[in-house]
Image: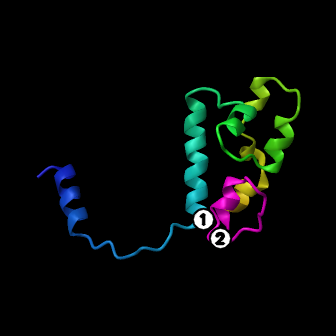
Amino acid sequence: MNDELWMEQLAAEAALENSAPASSCLKSKIYSNMILAMEEGGPLLPLPDTKQAGRALCVFEHLVEILPAPDSVQSLQYCKVCHAKALGERMENAPIYWPGCPYCEFQNR
């Protein structure tokens, strides 16, 4: 029996009774890794384009967005240097409350 078939059978037999939401730390770490993977594929959308696509910007991203900065500056991932990322990845119910901050939205409140 190959490993893939064995894993499928094991998963089919497992009871999925735990419906608790994922921890905010786990959600934050997954988000951070997804953004890193997106950056490997090329530059991110500039902040004005991101906002136009419907994503809310945090207060810090909004400050950068209104600056007359080139797209290379507007495309940086500012969450990398924000303390909300550090808190979100390490604390449940972290004391972060900024509108538009994904790490704040991940908190299980």
Mark found first going from the N terminus, 2 or 1: 1
Percent position (x, y) of residue 57? 74, 46
Instruction: Identify the residue at horizontal 55%, vertical 52% (top origin).
Output: 30
Residues at marks 2 and 1 touching, judged by CB atoms closer than 8 Å: yes
Which span is picked out in magenta? 89-109
Visual colour scheme? rainbow
- The reply, left or right, for residue 51 in relation to residue 62 is left
In front here: 64 or 11?
64
In front here: 63 or 55?
55
- The reply, left or right, for residue 109 in relation to residue 47 is left
Badge 2 is on which residue?
Answer: 92
How far apart marks 2 and 1 lie (CA) works out to 6 Å
Question: Image height check: is 31 above or below 41?
Answer: below
Question: Image height check: is 22 above or below 78?
Answer: below
Residue 96: in magenta span? yes
Name the outermost residue toward the left: 1
Residue 24: give its label: 1
Percent position (x, y) of residue 60? 83, 46
Percent position (x, y) of residue 51? 71, 39
Quadrant of residue 105 in the image?
bottom right
SS class, disc 2: loop
Question: Image height check: is 52 above or below 89?
Answer: above
Rate crowding at label 1 as few (under 14), some (14 to 19) or many (20 or more) other CA atoms within 10 Å. Answer: many
Residue type (three-letter) at the residue carrying disc 1: Ser
Residue 1: in magenta span? no
Instruction: Identify the residue at horizontal 62%, vertical 61% (top origin).
Output: 106
Percent position (x, y) of residue 25? 60, 63
In front here: 55 or 11?
55
In the rendered image, the quadrant that contains the C terminus is bottom right
